[in-house]
Image (tube, helix red, strand yellow):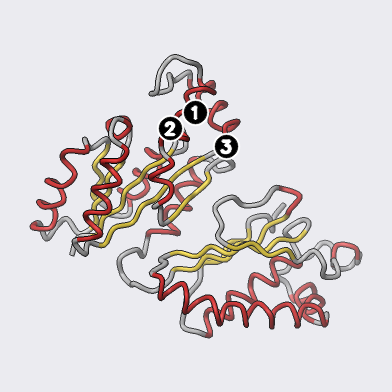
Amino acid sequence: MTEYLFIVGMSGAGRSSGAAALEDLGWFVIDNMPVSLISKVSELADRNSNAEKVVFVVGRYGYEAIDGVRAEIEHLRYLGANVRVLFLEATDEALITRFESTRRRHPLGDEGVAVSIDKERKLLMPLREIADIIVDTSSLNIHELRRRISELFSGAGESTALTITVVSFGFSYGTPRDVDLLFDCRFLPNPHWIPELRPHTGLEDPVKNYVMEQPDTIEFLEKLRSLFDFLLPAYEKEGKSYLTIAVGCTGGRHRSVVVANQLAQYFSDRSISPRVIHRDVDR
């Protein structure tokens, strides 16, 4: 059965770059598909054994019929098709900077970039509401976005199991935007204040052993495991495909790295192979 992915989202948030990354992964990409042709193309794809993975990039043609795009997505799902929706967004500040640096005209008109961005954000809300995955690209360059897309979709369609990503980060550098659950472990003793541990990271035994020797770490992990013992079956029953979990500490080099790896091990012990990203470990 053909797998469909709709890429939607804000102009300037990286739809074209995301589509290019998926094309490199072997997906058949159709850019700016008019709404009226989506159903016809999907019928043809279902008859073509070579069209196993199809991407519809909804751009300017979709703005005139956002409700129509949503209806096509829901119709495909009603027919039992494997359909996912990827919504790319970014902050107003990031989008304004991108439009100013490229001197591109915003596709929604000449009222000024800020006004057009606000109008587009409201216009696209019905598609954001049904998105399976929301990725905020504000702090991502092209290469980082392509890597993120690869992490999410390189194995897409091979399994119906929940795909889990665990991210460690430092609050000093901002919280990740495209996460489902976020946990703060700054209450744990900070190895940064121990001179012999400061140069090391949570990937190394001295820091790992120190963090894992703390009673609060053990209790925190026990409570997280209990939480996910409850959540995972509920998410899978609901049909959730992707779950991104973020664990933060002050700098993202010590405590959050250790806790994130412990969570990843918990998932691995349950035959789930999580992706692990240590965003700030090298800062």
175 with respect to 163 (left or right): right
**Is tag 1's residue or tag 3's residue first in the polypeptide sequence?**
3
Identified by mark 3, the residue type is: Thr
| Numbered disc 2: secondary structure | loop
Q: Residue at x 69, y 83 (%)?
A: 222
Residue 27: x percent and y percent?
A: 27, 52
Instruction: Name the mark nearer the viewer: 2 or 1.
Output: 1
Q: Residue at x 50, y 24 (%)?
A: 99
Residue 30: x percent and y percent?
A: 24, 42
The reply to whether the C-beta atoms of the residues labelled 2 and 3 are less than 8 Å apart is: no
Residue 251 lies, with reference to residue 69, above or below; the image says: below
The residue lying toward the viewer, choosing from 98 and 160, is 160
Q: Which residue is the site of mark 2?
A: 11
The reply to whether the C-beta atoms of the residues labelled 2 and 1 are less than 8 Å apart is: yes
Q: Which residue is the site of mark 3?
A: 91
Residue 209 lies, with reference to residue 57, above or below; the image says: below
Q: Residue at x 48, y 53 (%)?
A: 148
Q: Which mark is residue 117?
A: 1
